[in-house]
Image: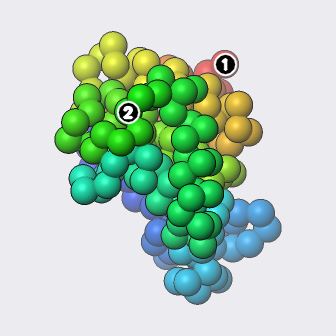
Amino acid sequence: MGPSGSGKTTLLHLLAGVVTPTSGTVSWRGKDLARLGDAARSRLRRSDFGFVFQSGQLLPELPAIENVALPLMLAGTARRQAEVRARDWFAPLGLQGLERRRPGELSGGQAQRVAIARALVGSPGVVFADEPTGALDQTTGQEVMHLLTTACAAQGAALVVVTHDPDVAGWCRRVVRLRDGRVESDEVTR
């Protein structure tokens, strides 16, 4: 948590292996991410990590079901099988009946729930969420955080959330506050 420019997204990118640290190490399951090549880090992001972004980052030309199935297909799962697994996420996230709708035909909250389904469909060990409620009204944001935290817990996935919003941080068990690229505080909240 921290204000704009504090280093939150940079830290998330370091943890997810998108960028490598200039010092220190980021380890996942005993592997130093900086020692992995680009292709190996990409495979790791496809297999072990899920991502939810502020604006969802859904592909506008694909219906919701294909947006959710996309990580599986990129990992080599056949389209039909990927869509079957993707469909399993629609009812639990309140999206039943919306499988064929394109992102432009969804509300902001519906689109974020599709993004959550996409992040979880591959059974990741960690879900990284960068301002997942930033484009939503407060009520919808609370609903999305409830679904995100509940779904990650049910799947056994760790959740790393980047936010400047204290209400969003309130959903987390640990809050690390950043300012000017440095850790200002690190507290267990519940």
Name the element at disc 2: loop
Residue 65 badge: none
Q: Residue 58 at what x, y percent from top left?
A: 32, 51
Seen as rendered, the residue at the extreme front is 80
Q: Residue 84 at what x, y percent from top left?
A: 60, 48
Q: Residue 22 at what x, y percent from top left?
A: 49, 76
Q: Earlier in the sequence, mark 1 or mark 2?
A: 2
* Residue 190 horizontal side relative to residue 83, left or right: right
Q: Nearer the viewer, residue 169 or 127?
A: 127
Name the element at disc 1: loop
**Is 27 situated above or below 35?**
above
Neighbor class of circle 1 (other Cα within 10 Å; few <14, some 14-19, many 20+) is: few
* Residue at image point 73% right, 39% down: 156
* Residue 171 visible in this rendered orientation of the protein: yes
Label 2 is placed on what type of residue?
Leu
**Is 37 situated above or below 66?**
below
Number of marks in the rendered image = 2
Residue 98 badge: 2
Kindly report the distance in space between the C-alpha atoms of the residues bearing marks 1 and 2.
36 Å
* Residue at image point 69% right, 65% down: 27
* Residue 21 visible in this rendered orientation of the protein: no
